[in-house]
């Protein structure tokens, strides 16, 4: 793996992890252009996610610190029998809702009927070069979800001076959690889909995006831990990566990711989300056209490699 490839992938990951355009979908597209097998580079992709995880922690350090303090205070209340569900603080409520939103992720480890794979394996498999058409179609799904989110946000602003509810309830958390599971498929943006789903539920857009980014922290961390475990147990997974290019990619993804959070929040605040809806639609359609052409020729039109 060379440095140019690592830098490019770091930039792509940093931008697309937080912008609502699907990081995994774009990584698949870029790898397709370079003629690199997405399956064999899954470990590298996860390490890029670790870089963006660092960006979230730095950007939201105050909120994360407040949640950590609230967690220990909550434990103390529970053991001293002072905790009351109806009297929970905003931070305590967010902790409970985050846990509820994370529970649906266990669906990924359930077996797919009629196969020896689980749903997590299917998500990883779709990221390969052979499924460019599927990933492109899922980018269109992201565009549709973003469009629905935009419409719902306008409705929320008309109904409430605050632009919607500022507190999640159990149903909100479950719905967002299930959406996050679906977003493990390359092409469906995790940030875009969970944001749109929250807006459909009547949540204020700024509260929704903050919740989305914080929810992604344990998700990305868990993904990295599982992949590191697989890398240790599977010989050859890290062959050809190179430690220095890997670190370069992680640093680039962290720096670019931090900037991407600022960009996303600005676009959301100024009601310019339609740009991302149009962008994902254009990229999705272009990807489908390319996939159809490659189905006819049997070769990658960028690298010339046989599919």
Image (cartoon, rainbow, N blue to C red):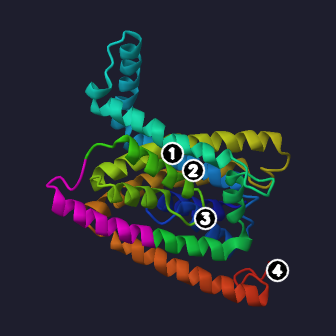
Q: State the residue in front, 214 or 123.
A: 123
Distance between the Cα atoms at labels 1 and 3? 17 Å
Few, some or many C-alpha atoms within 10 Å of disc 2 (few <14, some 14-19, many ≥20)? Answer: many
Say which label, 3 or 2, has the lower sequence index. 3
- The magenta-colored residue range is 144-165
Say which label, 2 or 4, has the lower sequence index. 2
x and y, in percent, of residue 277 in the image: 41, 73
Q: Secondary structure at mark 3?
A: helix
Residue drawn at point x = 57 percent, y = 45 percent? 105
Provide the residue designation for mark 4: 306
Q: Residue furthest top?
A: 80
* Mark 1 in CB contact with mark 2 (< 8 angstroms): yes
Provide the residue designation for mark 1: 53
x and y, in percent, of residue 263 in the image: 35, 60
Provide the residue designation for mark 3: 27
Q: State the residue in front, 279 or 148.
A: 148
Distance between the Cα atoms at labels 3 and 4? 20 Å
Provide the residue designation for mark 2: 49
């Amino acid at each position: 793996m060379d440095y140019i490839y690592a830098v490019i992938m770091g930039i792509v990951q940093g931008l697309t992890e937080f912008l609502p355009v699907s990081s995994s979908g774009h990584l698949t597209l870029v790898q397709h252009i370079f003629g690199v097998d997405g399956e064999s580079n899954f470990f590298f992709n996860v390490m890029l996610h670790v870089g963006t995880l660092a960006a979230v922690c730095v950007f939201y350090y105050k909120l994360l610190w407040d949640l950590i303090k609230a967690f220990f205070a909550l434990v103390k209340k529970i053991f001293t029998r002072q905790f009351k569900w109806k009297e929970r603080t905003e931070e305590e409520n967010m902790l409970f809702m985050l846990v509820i939103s994370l529970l649906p992720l266990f669906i990924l480890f359930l077996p797919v009927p009629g196969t020896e794979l689980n749903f997590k394996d299917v998500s990883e498999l779709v990221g390969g070069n052979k499924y460019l058409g599927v990933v492109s179609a899922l980018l269109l799904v992201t565009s549709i979800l973003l469009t629905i989110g935009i419409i719902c946000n306008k409705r929320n602003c008309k109904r409430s001076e605050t632009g919607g509810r500022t507190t999640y309830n159990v149903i909100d958390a479950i719905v967002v959690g299930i959406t996050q599971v679906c977003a493990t498929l390359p092409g469906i943006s995790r940030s875009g889909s969970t944001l749109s789903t929250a807006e459909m539920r009547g949540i204020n857009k700024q509260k929704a995006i903050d919740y989305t980014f914080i929810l992604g922290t344990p998700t990305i961390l868990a993904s990295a831990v599982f992949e590191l475990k697989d890398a240790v147990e599977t010989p050859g997974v890290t062959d050809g990566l190179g430690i220095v290019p890997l670190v370069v990619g992680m640093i680039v993804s962290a720096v670019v990711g931090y900037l991407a959070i600022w960009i996303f929040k600005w676009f959301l605040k100024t009601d310019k989300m339609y740009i991302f809806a149009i962008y994902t639609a254009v990229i999705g359609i272009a990807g489908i056209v390319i996939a159809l052409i490659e189905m006819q020729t049997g070769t990658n039109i960028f690298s010339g490699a046989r599919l």
